Image (cartoon, grey):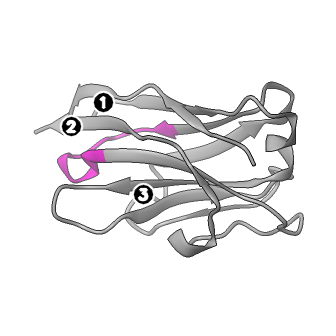
């Protein structure tokens, strides 16, 4: 089982860009579908974006579509989330999660589909 670790959170202003990275030490990370989720205070954890283990298939929540981009570099065991045109509503703790035993074109978009979770990184967008 892999253990994802998130990097790159911080404090930015509305309209800025920020990139997050999710790294796992296990070579098998390249065989996992990976999702980015976020959780704002008092709210449930929600999906932001997900990517298949092949990297060829991606999905986004409606709230970030067109602004965020998920990608991966399996040679580096890393999944990225590029966030552009950030809004105050994007504030929250961002989590990376990995899902095993998925077919090549599957990118799960539900919390319950993920097996391993990182500790999260805080993203704060000031208005």
Circle 1 — which element? loop
Q: Say which residue appears at 69% left-offset and 33% top-offset.
A: 24
Residue 6 seen from this side:
yes
Residue 56 in the image: x percent, y percent? Answer: 82, 54
Mark 2: secondary structure: strand
Tell me the residue that label 2 is attached to.
125
Which region is colored magenta? Answer: 82-92
| Residue 37 point in image, percent of width and height | 46, 56
10 Å neighbourhood of mark 2: few (<14), some, or many (≥20)? many
Residue 14 is left or right of residue 3, and the answer is left
Marker count (numbered): 3
Looking at the image, tell me whether mark 3 or mark 1 is earlier in sequence order: 1
Lower sequence index among marks 2 and 3 = 3
Residue at the limit of the structure toward the front, as seen here: 1
Does the residue at mark 2 contact the one at mark 1 (Cβ under 8 Å)?
yes
Q: Is residue 83 magenta?
A: yes
Tag 3's secondary structure? loop
Disc sitting over residue 107 in the figure: none
């Amino acid at each position: 089982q892999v253990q994802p670790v998130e990097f790159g959170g911080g404090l930015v202003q509305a309209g800025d860009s920020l990139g997050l990275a999710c790294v796992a030490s296990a070579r098998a990370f390249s065989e996992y579908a990976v999702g980015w989720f976020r959780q704002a205070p008092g709210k449930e954890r929600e999906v932001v974006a997900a990517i298949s283990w092949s990297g060829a298939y991606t999905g986004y929540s409606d709230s970030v579509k067109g602004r965020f981009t998920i990608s991966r570099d399996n040679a580096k065991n890393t999944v990225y989330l590029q966030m552009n045109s950030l809004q105050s509503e994007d504030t929250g703790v961002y989590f990376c999660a990995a899902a095993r035993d998925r077919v090549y074109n599957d990118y799960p978009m539900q919390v319950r589909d993920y097996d391993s979770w990182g500790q999260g990184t805080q993203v704060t967008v000031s208005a």
